[in-house]
Image (cartoon, rainbow, N blue to C red):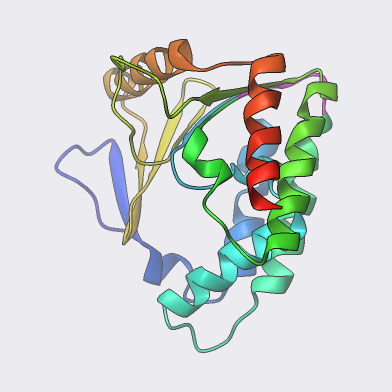
């Protein structure tokens, strides 16, 4: 596993991570999810994996399989594994703070039916006591933070950053603190509750 100049960070190319297929990658995160009590996730491109429907997840993973030119496509099996792993979101003993840019609601993965089902599912997050979903409106003025690459912070022990070619896992406390600072600034720009639902409903209306 290649390391960055900071020995407390690892840089792992996707082609190595998914060499045995996409499903093993999904399963490899089960233990981390079981150990984590506070999930903080920001995405400017896709629905967070924890909120993906099986159809949406399959469309995302199929795109990955094609881009990486995998010798076999196990995206359907990987999507089922992702949804199964995501059941942790129903655990009231954990907390999930999820932020997405409004543009995520319009980045269409799969056909219109798959996208509509994903947006419909997103509307149900209000019923999940452990979940806080914030949406950063495209019309936000004087942003406190620019849109960033997707990143996850697990408790305060690991920050995981997704790049085009690789995943960077960071364990150094000072670096994790910077991601948490960025996360809080992004969070301050988001809307929640009825306002967030309004943005989702608008995206659904535009889709149909």
User: Residue 93 magenta-drawn?
Assistant: yes
x, y percentage for residue 4?
Answer: 20, 46
Q: Residue at x 52, y 47 (%)?
A: 46
Q: Residue at x 82, y 27 (%)?
A: 91
User: Would you say residue 37 is visible in this rendering?
Assistant: no
Q: For residue 12, which quarter of the picture?
A: bottom left
Instruction: Look at the image and tell me in which quarter the N terminus lies.
Output: bottom left
x, y percentage for residue 118?
Answer: 72, 49
> Left or right: 10 with respect to 93?
left
Q: Image height check: is 138 above or below 94?
A: below
Q: Along the line of sight, which residue is nearer the eye, 159 or 138?
A: 138
Q: For residue 131, which quarter of the picture?
A: top right
Q: For residue 184, which quarter of the picture?
A: top left
Q: Image height check: is 140 above or below 30?
A: above
x, y percentage for residue 76?
Answer: 71, 72
> Left or right: 115 with respect to 80?
left
> Left or right: 183 with respect to 133?
left
Q: Image height check: is 103 above or below 182?
A: below
Q: Along the line of sight, which residue is nearer the eye, 92 or 193?
A: 193
x, y percentage for residue 25?
Answer: 57, 61
Q: Residue at x 68, y 55 (%)?
A: 115
User: Would you say residue 185 is visible in this rendering?
Assistant: yes
Q: Along the line of sight, which residue is nearer the eye, 106 or 16?
A: 106
Q: Residue furthest left?
A: 5
* Residue bounds of the magenta highlight: 91-97
User: Residue 19 magenta-drawn?
Assistant: no
């Amino acid at each position: 596993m290649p390391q960055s100049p900071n020995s407390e960070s690892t840089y792992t190319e996707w082609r190595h991570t998914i060499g045995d297929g996409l499903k093993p990658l999904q399963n490899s995160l089960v233990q981390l999810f079981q150990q984590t009590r506070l999930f903080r996730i920001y995405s400017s491109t896709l629905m967070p994996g924890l909120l993906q429907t099986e159809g949406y997840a399959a469309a995302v993973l199929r795109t990955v399989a094609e881009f990486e030119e995998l010798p076999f496509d196990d995206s359907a099996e990987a999507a089922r594994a992702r949804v199964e792993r995501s059941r942790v979101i129903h655990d009231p003993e954990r907390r999930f703070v999820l932020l997405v840019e409004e543009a995520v609601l319009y980045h269409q993965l799969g056909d219109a039916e798959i996208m509509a089902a994903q947006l419909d599912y997103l509307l149900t997050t209000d019923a999940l006591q452990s979940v806080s979903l914030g949406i950063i409106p495209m019309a936000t003025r004087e942003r406190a933070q620019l849109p960033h690459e997707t990143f996850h912070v697990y408790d305060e022990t690991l920050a995981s950053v997704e790049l085009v070619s690789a995943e960077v896992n960071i364990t150094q406390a000072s670096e994790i603190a910077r991601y948490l600072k960025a996360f809080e600034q992004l969070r301050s720009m988001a809307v929640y509750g009825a306002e967030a639902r309004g943005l989702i409903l608008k995206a659904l209306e535009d889709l149909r």
